[in-house]
Amino acid sequence: MATTKQPSPGERARELREQLEDANRRYHVLDDPAIPDARYDELLHELVLLEEAHPELVTADSPTQRVGGAPSSEFPPYRHEIPMLSLANAFDEAGLRAFDARVVKLAGAPAAYVCELKIDGLAISLRYERGALVSAGTRGDGETGEEVTPNIRTIRDIPARLPAPVPARIDVRGEVYLKKGDFEKLNASRAAAGHALFANPRNTAAGGLRQKDPRLTAGRRLSFFAYAAGAFDGAGRRPISQSELLDALEAMGLPVNPHRHRCATIDEVRDFCAKWEAERDSLDYEIDGVVIKVDDLALQAKLGYAAKDPRWAIAFKFRAQEARTKLLDIGINVSRSGKLNPYAVLEPVQLGGVTVRMATLHNEADIVRKDIRIGDTVTVRRAGDVIPYVAGPVLELRPKKTRTFELPERCPVCHSKVDHPPDDVFSYCTNVACPSQLRERIRHYCSRGAMDIEGVGDVMANALVDAKLCRDVADLYDLTGQRMSLLPRMGERSIQNVLDAIEGSKRRGLARLLSALGIRYVGGQNASLLAGEFGAIDAIAAASEDELSAVNGIGPQIAESVAFFFRQPSNLAVVERLGRHGVDMTAPRRPRVAAGPLSGKTLVLTGALPNLTREAATELIVAAGGKAGSAVSKKTDYVVAGDEAGSKLAKAESLGVPVIDEAGLRKLLSS
Ligand code: IVH
């Protein structure tokens, strides 16, 4: 019988390192993971144990040195054998053309260029000897930087070893950066831990590289793109152009940005710059421009340097998308649905070519979470064409006197009470007659599923509000032919049609009226549950939260919202006037079912059933003694799914809750 020979610890360590390096490379450079993360962790753990038992086997480039490693007490100076240069900038097409004109003049002929994205991170130089990463340093003043080798070793897409064949010695230059997604994750976990948030990916990356303890660098999940070489000896044919160099770096196993393009003319260069300025937000990392390099390396050498900048390259800088300015005040806008939207009043500032005076402040919770205060200097950002937003305060510049933002207790438009639902990041105006909500409220009241008043859509609702004919929905019933004749483009005939439709709406019944009032969380289904239970609007208005939530199918959140609605005097006044106009506010009460075929069962409806509306199906379920739930859980007995069922169906399937269709529901009802 053949025995398999156990590898020696040294052999096993080498094997593990190769597997881990390969997995790293597949994961980060080729974007093609070879093994699951858990397997990676297992292999890494085995190597850690092996190295702990045999410290003599630890190598500087072992993947175990990426996480942890001894904290360095300081950063030794790092001399660059070939200086790391900076670049002159171009800010517009004229700048690009001036650059090209000088190249053509000095070269005596038109030159081809390579365009690369200008990654917004920080430059680093990596020294590889016979394929092994031996040291790494920041740019510093270009001659001398700081040695940050242990920190660099924690970056998973910087290979510790380049697969053969490799040059005897190469300084790989590139950019260390933080992906937007990783930045968001990092900040989310900082927020959860109650730590201050990082301002932007670039600073976070820069700060990460300068950590004294490499474990902290590892925690920032930095990334890397290679784009140049410094010292470079040995290994066969050397690249003769920048495009060949980039391909060679990629072939060595280094991550090279895929969005690079060789351009034969400066017009092509301009188009590449314009394309990426427009599309920068589609990338998962920040770029602040395009770097344009003469492709031919011999020509680069001929062009040489002017002062400290090369004559063969230029950085085309995008217009800034971020600026700092003072937050003068926080105002509040009330949306059509009653949502209170805070906005920033700013000291005017130039941003991306426009003067910005106002910016969005997402929501109140965000203002509190980011600790944005009136009087702060804030970072204002815009992405693409969207409205600028306040990213956060610049804490170093916080003046002694600032004012914290207070959640308003009264609507800034109508001064009614504001509701702050506990699980919501927004607050809401609670007054159905609030002028800022009026248009939307009228449109909703008249819509097909609500009071079904044909002829009053968006345009008409706006016209009624603009002409001050409707200050709330009850005013609809005060309309006369004479008043409506003041509206633009309204003939006698269409006026009469609208008046007839308004008259007809008085007979829709309580369920439709409840959903037409636009009470938060009260759509058709909940409205018919409430109507059938209480039979009259007065009874609902008088019910306590507990009485409301005792209704089959009405949860505490809905009960809270309904009770709140009927506590507001302005809402009660509208309801009272609707009653005086003869709007039917009653519904047949649902007989109490002691027991039925669905007693004790909870059913959740999703999607559109072929022959039953949501309300009708709910009625049938409740009449059969069942409960109509709104969310699927393990306690749900059946999900009744129709066409275009969405997440509830998926949830049912994942929880193993039986799913039936309309026919299945009818079978249950008659069982
Ligand atoms: S080439 C002489 N290529 O931009 C060549 N730089 O403003 C010098 N950068 O210090 C660098 N992406 O930190 C080059 N594809 C790219 C780049 C890039 C970002 C940074 C780099 C440099 C700065 C110059």
Image (spheres, rainbow, N blue to C red):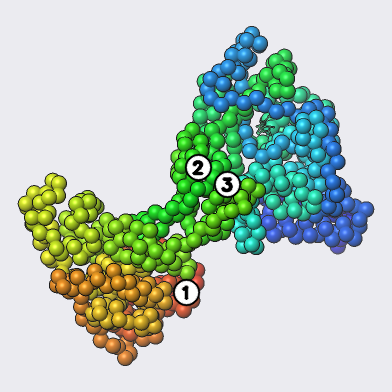
Image check: 300 left or right of 104? right
Q: Quadrant of residue 386?
A: top left
Q: Residues within 10 Å of mark 3 (few under 14, many from 20)?
A: many
Which residue is identified by label 3? Answer: 377
Q: Amino acid at mark 1?
A: Ser
> Closer to the observer: label 2 or label 1?
2
* Residue 664 appears in view: no
Residue 444 picture location, percent across and down: 26, 60
Q: Residues within 10 Å of mark 1 (few under 14, many from 20)?
A: some
The Cα atoms of the two marked residues, 3 and 1, are separated by 47 Å
Judge from the rendering whether residue 512 lies leftward or rightward of residue 545; answer left or right: left
On whether ligand 1 comes within 8 Å of the CB at mark 1, the answer is no
Residue 131, percent from left and from top: 81, 37
Q: Residue at x 77, y 57 (%)?
A: 43
* Residue beneath the point at 91% across and 56% down: 55
For label 1, the SS is: loop
| Amino acid type assigned to the residue bearing label 3 in the image | Thr
Q: Is residue 514 left or right of residue 309?
A: left
Question: Which callout, 2 or 1, points at the residue further toward the start of the chain?
Answer: 2
The residue that mark 1 highlights is: 633
Q: Earlier in the sequence, mark 3 or mark 1?
A: 3
Residue position marked by numbered label 2 in the rendering: 347
Q: Residue at x 30, y 83 (%)?
A: 624
Question: Residue 334 — which label?
Answer: none
Q: Secondary structure at mark 2?
A: strand
Q: Amino acid at mark 2?
A: Glu
User: Which residue is the extreme one toward the top?
Assistant: 108
